[in-house]
Amino acid sequence: MKKSTQSIDVLCRLHTNLTDEDIEKIKEISQNLPLIADLNRANVFIDCPTNEGKHAIVVAEASPRTAKSVYKNPVVGKFAYEAFEPAVLFTLRTGKEMFLNRAITQEGKTVEQSVVPIKGNKNNIIGALIMEKDISEKLKHQDKLKALSEATGTLSEILIGLTENRPIIPEVIEESLFFIDQKSRLMYFNPSAINLVYEVCHAECKVGVPIDNYFPCLKDIIKSSEELLMKEVKILNKVFQVKKITLGHHPKANGTFIIFRDLTELREKERELVVKSVVIREIHHRVKNNLQTVASLLRLQMRRGVPEDSKIYFIESLNRILSIASVYEIILSNSNVDDVDIYQLIEKIGNMIVYAEEFENRNITIEYSGPKIKIKSNKAVSIALIINELIQNCVKHAFKGISKGYIKVNYEKIENELYVEVIDNGVGYSPSAKPSLGLDIVKMMVEHDLSGYFSIERAENGTIASVKFPLDRE
Ligand SMILES: Nc1ncnc2c1ncn2[C@@H]1O[C@H](COP(=O)(O)OP(=O)(O)O)[C@@H](O)[C@H]1O
Ligand SMILES: [Mg+2]
């Protein structure tokens, strides 16, 4: 037996479901492959369907002696996949022939493929006879033609636009648009480009003049072999983004677009923003310092002696001022000038009240729990005042006759609402008859400033005050 028919035997038995009879038929046909290859000046193959069903396997092949072979290496024993050789799989599945279809070879070349089915004795499909011709060169040629015609199209549009109906879009865009030929000579420019040349060189923009006469700094950009380029250049005291777009491929370029975008204003605005944020920080700083000065003045007054029963009012006012100041302190410790972390804020205010020197010898602990949430500074001031009142009330009213005071501040975000709870294990809230400033402040802040709800009630063991309000959507 010849070597080639031997390998058909092995491959078919290993990878296909073909019967002995089918295999004999394939072998028979394979004898003629070299002749067919020579006659057609093409590579020819026999592929058989594999038992796994999805691909085919090459069982025989012949290269032409009358033309260059498509393949460098033998492909017998390799698989043919549907993605690369759709025609083969189509023929094997349907029994129909396919002519001059495009396929990708096992070596990655593009070929033109013709496929006819090989039928067994029971008229079933047992394989496909395939002929392949290399069309890579033809394709390259086609691509070149296509690129050329596209470039010509663009060029003629521009040229036609120049004479008659001027192209409307380049005429109205803000960017300055130049079109230059291979020797950098101007072929087209839009009105914005004319203005630019006038502004920068006090000269008139003229067709045929090399663009680097007007903009010497563009020399490198134009010379560069890259077809797409973007660079920032400074001309006089202006900043421009310059884009270069070459049509067609180097070295056979058909011309180049040079587009200038004025970034001066944008850069100026960026700089202003930075300055502004510095100014805002400085203002925050002063507000914070002023509030702290007011607080120290009150404290000084208290030290000089105030009637014992007014002392509590001084402390309360002091804490209100300091809780607003703590918002600014947190803002200043951040990089962002407008965001305040709620946890930080609540903790700062709680600790300030509970661990104040006035309450040094009382046994009160406070705990906080909640996720990391940032809120805008204006809301943060309201929250600071609310938390301040509620915690002050715990310290002031809840723990009369209670040896171990415990305060818990919880908050969480549910959907787009913030829930805050201040809980104590004290005597329990009961509405008092006398007018009360603290809870009025809370109610007002919650309802007016935060558009939310406030409630305070006696719990089984102490008091629960809760606040709920919508957060800004980002
Ligand atoms: N956590 C609390 N535990 C017990 N009673 C409370 C609590 N919070 C508030 N109260 C009661 O509610 C009243 C009103 O509080 P508030 O408006 O802050 O006024 P003030 O603190 O000046 O008395 C308090 O006088 C107190 O009787
Ligand atoms: Mg109070």
Image (tube, helix red, strand yellow):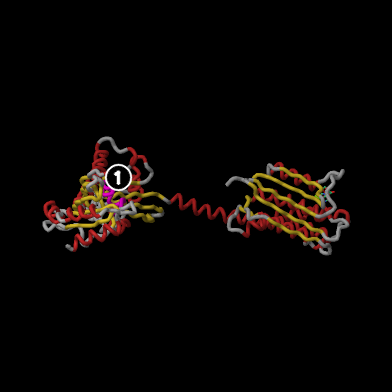
Asked which quadrant contains residue 447, the reply is top right
Residue 185 in view, yes or no: no
Crowdedness of circle 1 by 10 Å Cα count: few (<14), some, many (20+)?
A: many
Quadrant that contains the N terminus: bottom left
**Left or right of 320 on screen, residue 413:** left
Q: How many marks?
A: 1
Residue 207 horizontal/vertical position (percent): 25, 46
Residue 386 in view, yes or no: yes
Q: In terms of depth relative to the viewer, which is nearer, 86 or 30?
A: 30
Q: In terms of depth relative to the viewer, which is nearer, 232 or 10?
A: 10
Question: In the structure shown, which secondary structural element does the residue marked by tag 1 occupy?
Answer: strand
User: In the rendered structure, which amino acid carries the disc numbered 1?
Assistant: Phe
Residue 338 horizontal/vertical position (percent): 61, 52
Which residue occupies 23% across, 45% down?
98
Residue 119 horizontal/vertical position (percent): 22, 47
Residue 92 horizontal/vertical position (percent): 27, 48
Which residue occupies 35% across, 52% down?
243
Find disc 1 in the rendering and name its residue.
189
Which residue occupies 60% across, 54% down?
337
**Residue range (magenta):** 80-92
Q: In terms of depth relative to the viewer, which is nearer, 219 or 139?
A: 139
